[in-house]
Amino acid sequence: MHFTQIPILKLAPRHLLAFAYEAWTPFRSYHPVPIVFSQAKGSSIWDPEGNKYLDFLSAYSAVNQGHCHPKIVKALLEQAERLTLSSRAFYNDRFPIFAEHLTSMFGYEMVLPMNTGAEGVETTLKLARKWGYEKKKIPKDEAIIVSCCGCFHGRTLAVISMSCDNEATRGFGPLLPGHLKVDFGDEVALEKIFKEKGDRIAGFLFEPIQGEAGVIIPPDGYLKAVRDLCSKYNILMVADEIQTGLARTGRMLACDWEEVRPDVVILGKALRGGVVPVSAVLADKDVMLCIRPGEHGSTFGENPLASAVAAASLEVIRDERLAERSAKMGEELRHQLNKVQQQFPNVIKEVRGKGLFNAVELNTKNLFPVSAYDICIKLKERGILAKPTHDTIVQLTPPLCMSLEELPEGSKALHDVLQIDLPEM
Ligand SMILES: Cc1ncc(COP(=O)(O)O)c(C=O)c1O
């Protein structure tokens, strides 16, 4: 197939569009639910035939504000007509506004902007190593980063070097040295590793709630324990809040649930309002200034278009009180899902979440050979778009703007799939 055929696809029916994806990109590993997005607004998605669906994934929390939010789109269009790129050889008049918004909102002295979430994580790995050598005096080339089993921080080579997932790492070796793993949520294991190797550990990188692993919530008090241990052993506490941050869990940061302040925070996803790639690393000067001019950056980092979009995305989160909304709506969603669990206790093992960051864990033994993916296909046929994680978990993370009338559609569809469709599957 040749690339000149692309324009024809504008007129092609849905199945041909899906086929074209498979033919032209190697990235089938996501195993998408077969629906083609053509238009979206708020919590609603339409396919090319005009069928409407409710979004219960939010592009992995990248559209917390809802699809095509008018204020974010307006900021994009206005900025696109004025200036889109200065490169980092010059200054632009938009980045300082975004930087001021972001640092004052989260109470950090400095921000280092990047594009994708994985680049944000890469940035923190370099930053933590540099801080380790300059401030902690770790011997040359011996710095260690500790991360958690089951983590997901992106797909670049440095980042997959921290992964325990064979699918992410197989065929890409040699991986980067200087990484150690610890069980997520286990403060005793964390202290053990800090005690044994603390003099060479520069940073502990973790998700406050593990997203891709299936919305895994650590025991109460874990975040506080991490803070105390990192302070005790002089190790940077680095929170990857790319998915959990920006109101998703019912607080601006998931670390706010235990009133804990990490040394470094990584943001992405909803920082872009679902529009253009922006990620950011937040830290105070004593950490951030370990990176000097010329040592890190990106041509599109700090670009005025992304800065205008990100500033508007933050304003929407603040003005529409999306954190409070997420906390309240999350309680309601879990209440509805728990009722479904009571009706199907053999099929649903657990309902868990914080704010609108939720998962339903299925009982594979009782469900076999039906998988979470099959359940998501049936949900889609009932107008609900959700994402399977592993074979057993359905992640439910709707846009935070979803209305109270729309919200019960998710649990109703799950009920109907289990009651009506499952016996036929
Ligand atoms: C916690 C976390 N970190 C990092 C990333 C990587 O972000 P990106 O896909 O923008 O590179 C993701 C993406 O899902 C994520 O969930």
Image (cartoon, rainbow, N blue to C red):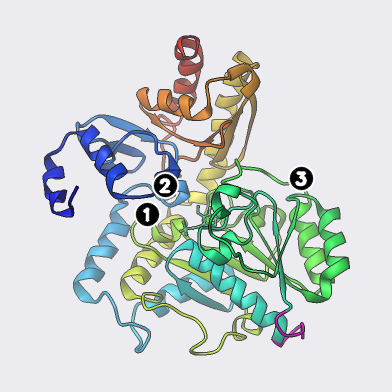
| Along the line of sight, the residue nearer the viewer: 47 or 165 | 165
- The magenta region covers 134-141
**Does the magenta segment cover residue 96?**
no
Q: Identify the element where label 2 is drawn.
A: helix
Q: Is residue 358 visible?
A: yes
Which residue position is annotated with label 1?
274
Tell me which label, 2 or 3, sits earlier in the chain.
2
Mark linked to residue 219: 3
Q: Quadrant of residue 398?
A: top left
| Along the line of sight, the residue nearer the viewer: 169 or 48 | 169
| Along the line of sight, the residue nearer the viewer: 421 or 77 | 421
Left or right, 114 with reference to 361? left
Q: Is residue 335 above or below residue 425?
A: below
Q: Quadrant of residue 178?
A: bottom right
Q: Is residue 363 visible?
A: no
Tell me which label, 1 or 3, sits earlier in the chain.
3
Mark 1 neighbour class, 10 Å CA radius: few under 14, some 14 to 19, many 20 or more: many
Find out whether the residues at labels 2 and 1 contact each other: C-beta distance under 8 Å: yes
Q: Is residue 102 above or below residue 222?
A: below
Q: What residue type is labelled 1?
A: Gly
Give the foreground label among 2 and 3. Answer: 2
Which residue position is annotated with label 2?
59
In the rendered image, residue 84, in percent from the top left (x then y), is placed at 26, 74
Marks 1 and 3, how far apart at CA: 31 Å
